[in-house]
Image (cartoon, rainbow, N blue to C red):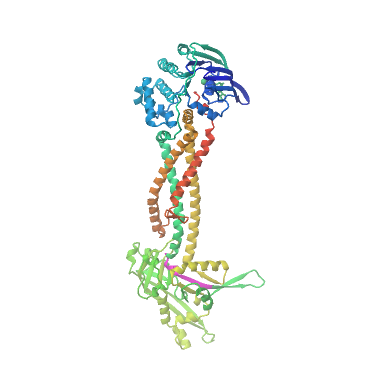
Amino acid sequence: MSFFVLKHVTKTYSIEKRSFNALNDVSLSFANKGLVSIVGKSGSGKSTLLNVLMGLEKPTNGEVYYKNQNITKISKSSFSKLHLFEISMIYQHYNIFDELTPLENVILPLLIRGINPKRAEDMALKLFRKFSLGYLLKQNTEVLSGGEKQRIAILRGLITNPKVILADEPVGALDSTNATMVMDMFKEISKEKLVIMVSHHKKLVEQYSDRIISIEDGKIIGDEIINEYKGYDSDNTLKASYSNLWTKLFIKKNLKANLKKNIFSLVVNVFGFLVIMLSFGFSNGSKESEREALRNNLACERATITKKITYKVENSPLSFIKQTRPSRDEVNEIVKPNFHAEVSYNYSYLFSDYPEITYNSTRIDSAEFMPIYSLCDSFTLPKVLKYGALPTKESIEQIVVNEEFAKSIDPNINKVIDKVIIFSGQSEISYATGDNDNPVIKDTYSYSYRGKIVGIVKEFNFLNTPKVYYSYLSLERELKNTLMDNLSRYKNERFTFYDYVNNVKDDESVSGYSYNLFLKSVDDLDKLYLLIQENKENESALEISSSTYEIYTTYSSFIDTFSIALFAFMVIAFFGVNFIIGMISLSSFIERKKESAILTSLGAKDKSISSIFLLENYIVIGASLVLSFLIIFPAQLGLNAIFSNVFMLDNLIKVPIRSFLGIPYLFIPLLIIISLLVSTLFILIPLTIYKNKSIVEELRDE
Ligand code: ADP
Ligand code: MG
């Protein structure tokens, strides 16, 4: 039995339902030495024959015996793996890597087989010297001549010490001088190994061959033996294990070669990661800032309580609502069990919420006047007051304004302290006596107060308006001290405006139709807002309202909408980024399909080849993550500074590094793991789809 035998081998290809035989009942046997040439016209089946011998193609019919072993039965992949250790293929266009050095090209099959690089280099250097090619070691592969490249390719084929060298048109692309040098090399090799070569070069074939096989339409039509060899040598094949270390060489080469693409990926990645981190940071920080927002408003302590009575018009779908001041008992019923609060009369009929204001004899656009109880009480607003100061003395002459108001006096708000504004107005009370001689008694409450600005509060200014805060108790004291002259004279007893508001009927406008509710602790704010909300939902007769609550709910729904939008943007950015990465890696895979095919033919496993692509991406992703983490903190700081200036909210963006979903430091590893997982998927899916494309196709010389 011979060394390498084909028995009745047929290879059938079908193209568009028509099948034809590229090899038709081919039987051949080869000894373990000698230079065998295969000649024939283009398309006669020469390459197919070599591919069957190489194990890259499985015959449709017939058997192949290699060292007495029928290797047709085993799977195509184990067939080629078995062969890869014993058979090397040389191609017309060399298929070596220009970006690697000649030495790296030659030792590659050894590295793939897990040989230690030092030992691999020693083996390669011996081989370079043996064929007097040492001078190539210092050269750049790219600039070598075709003949030199082909000889590097042959050295690469020899380095694993195979039994057989298969060469498809190895001198087809070379001039005669180079062709002769390559043929000399094959002749030398064929003294110890079987060399099977396809060539058109009639002269060289006749000059060098020990045997010439002619093929036509897949059939052997001639077999001329010039020097007969017989034999079969001992097994001295390189035994090796696979290793992945060699992929480093390719990752380095490819990262460099695809620099622009990788920088683009990096930028896209960094953008994506920043969007992700900022949107998490926003939804995290804005939750806390919502609470801050409502406290950062001096008006937050005050609410008004009114009552609505609905009257149905008989026999009609119409009804009308009348507003009235509730009774004290009704108010106490909901206030007392809920919070520490002060319930007081509302004097807005007498002292307007929008009095006329002048400063330096010029009128100032309307600002809202808000009574606060705390000016005269132990109410503490630590958070609110960190920016401003409250007056120390109980007096209506001392007022606190918010920044919006201060700006309307002087753009440089610091100059506003100690400035005096005058606010004035008047309102008339008509008292119906029921007495025909004197049916109506009129009294006018007119005021012109000088208010000295003793504090400026910097408030959360989303939808906020200019506000002036005055002491509720001071106003009350004023009203207690101001007589209603006409009414007092008529009734012949002392009657103050304070008395009047206190005793007026609840459904008269002087009552303000409401009570003021002043919280005694900011900690009760949440409870108050909850109560307002519940009251609204239950359509209860008592209605509690608060201007800061309105601002707060508008703000939180704005924040919620924005969070959702940002989250959607984040998801799109995340998948978009990974899609782009996947596309980039797919495109480089397609560009480098030939590289993958060559590596496969040199014995590299699919897994190792995929790992080159994956690792390249992991490196880019890793670099992007590092860069993103470097950028995120200054970015967060800057954005927060902007938000703090514009909205008076600190830490609106707070990337949840310290704690995420309640677990400390979960965010960073989660981000890394998820991005690696998703990018792995986006890379592996296209790779798996493309992997099964035939490598023979890729290696075919055009
Ligand atoms: P040669 O190398 O002698 O020029 P080949 O062995 O490459 O010829 O091809 C022999 C015939 O088989 C040609 O007609 C070629 O087009 C066809 N052929 C080769 N490979 C395939 C394939 N994978 N699918 C279909 N036809 C193929
Ligand atoms: Mg061919």
Q: Quadrant of residue 449?
A: bottom left
Q: Can residue 407 be seen at all in this image of the molecule? A: yes
The stretch drawn in magenta includes residue 486: no
Q: Which region is colored magenta? A: 296-306
The stretch drawn in magenta includes residue 304: yes
The vertical placement of 589 against 54, above or below, is below
The vertical placement of 599 against 275, above or below, is above
**Residue sitting at x 49%, y 64%:** 550
Q: Can residue 325 be seen at all in this image of the molecule? A: no
Foreground residue among 251 and 155 = 155
Quadrant the N terminus occupies: top right
How many numbered badges does the structure rendering display?
A: 0
Counting from the top left corner in percent of width and height, residue 582 is at: 49, 39
The vertical placement of 269 against 702, above or below, is below
Counting from the top left corner in percent of width and height, residue 185 is at: 41, 18
Q: Residue furthest bottom?
A: 492
Counting from the top left corner in percent of width and height, residue 385 is at: 38, 67
Foreground residue among 576 and 158 = 158
Counting from the top left corner in percent of width and height, residue 668 is at: 43, 50
Q: Residue furthest right?
A: 315
Foreground residue among 417 and 277 = 277
**Residue sitting at x 54%, y 32%:** 692
The vertical placement of 568 against 551, above or below, is above
